[in-house]
């Protein structure tokens, strides 16, 4: 039986500003099994971004319990959270978040700089990851010399260099055209299949969500449905 990569129980998060408090999450419970690919959907203001930030240990809940593997995230300090984030979680964003003056190889190697990996190994692993996502020969291209789909492939390669247990993809196809979106989903499905990688995709696109094994829907800070996808779409390129 699969172990859970992560488990949330009754998670709450409220933001306080000049106006009334914003109850972003109001008791969210959710788990992800090893090797599972799950989509999180919901309208604007439903709590998707807040949940993504909490899952990625970029922020901490106000209440509830969050365990990542066998670790209690609620008990971690900033140093522990940074270590978990850098070593065990990979991030992919809608707008790629690449350094404009750094080559594809340098962008992919960046997480290993923070992890203290030596230069030769960094370059070797970065090149390997670029090959994995189909960008052989593009190692020394700058982001502005690459298409949007190629930039997202660089971002995916960067997310994989530290061999994470979890890949969090926040609207990974949101800045791409339909054909390129399918190419990226095909890549994510291949990584999921071949590496048994656990993946969470936040998306507002129903057709993208149907490439996953489960779809969790949020509304007003609550999980309103959590359904298995009987026959996930297989992206064809």
Image (cartoon, rainbow, N blue to C red):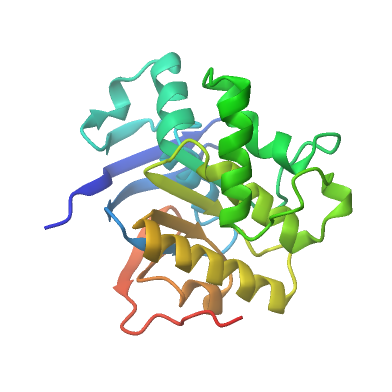
Q: Residue at x 40, y 28 (%)?
A: 84
Q: Residue at x 60, y 42 (%)?
A: 158
Q: Residue at x 65, y 71 (%)?
A: 181
Q: Nearer the viewer, residue 130 or 214?
A: 130
Residue 223 image offset from top left, x and y in percent: 35, 60
Q: Nearer the viewer, residue 236 or 25?
A: 236
Q: Is residue 225 visible?
A: yes
Residue 192 image offset from top left, x and y in percent: 41, 62
Q: Is residue 18 visible?
A: no
| Side of 235 where 143 appears, left or right | right
Quadrant assignment for the N terminus: bottom left
Q: Nearer the viewer, residue 150 or 181?
A: 150
As drawn, 139 above or below 44: above
Q: Residue at x 40, y 35 (%)?
A: 88
Q: What is the quadrant of residue 101 in the picture?
A: top right
| Side of 153 where 175 appears, left or right | right
Residue 44 image offset from top left, x and y in percent: 60, 59
Q: What is the quadrant of residue 120 in the picture?
A: top right
């Amino acid at each position: 039986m699969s172990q859970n990569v992560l488990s949330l129980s009754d998670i709450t998060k409220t933001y306080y500003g000049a106006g009334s408090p914003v109850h972003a999450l109001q008791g969210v419970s959710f788990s992800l099994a090893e090797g599972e690919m799950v989509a999180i959907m919901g309208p604007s203001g439903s709590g998707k971004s807040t949940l993504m930030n909490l899952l990625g240990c970029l922020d901490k809940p106000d209440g509830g319990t969050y365990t990542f593997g066998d670790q209690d995230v609620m008990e971690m300090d900033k140093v522990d959270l940074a270590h978990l984030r850098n070593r065990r979680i990979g991030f992919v964003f809608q707008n790629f978040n690449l350094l404009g003056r750094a080559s594809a190889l340098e962008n992919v190697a960046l997480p290993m700089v923070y992890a203290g990996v030596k230069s030769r190994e960094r370059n070797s692993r970065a090149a390997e990851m670029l090959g994995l996502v189909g960008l052989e020969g593009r190692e020394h291209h700058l982001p502005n010399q690459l298409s949007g789909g190629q930039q997202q492939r660089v971002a995916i390669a960067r997310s994989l260099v530290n061999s994470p247990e979890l890949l969090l993809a926040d609207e990974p196809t949101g800045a791409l055209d339909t054909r390129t979106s399918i190419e990226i989903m095909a890549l994510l499905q291949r990584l999921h299949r071949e590496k048994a990688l656990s993946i969470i995709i936040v998306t507002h696109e129903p057709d993208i969500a149907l490439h996953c094994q489960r779809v969790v829907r949020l509304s007003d800070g609550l999980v309103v449905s959590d359904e298995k996808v009987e026959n996930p779409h297989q992206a064809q390129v």
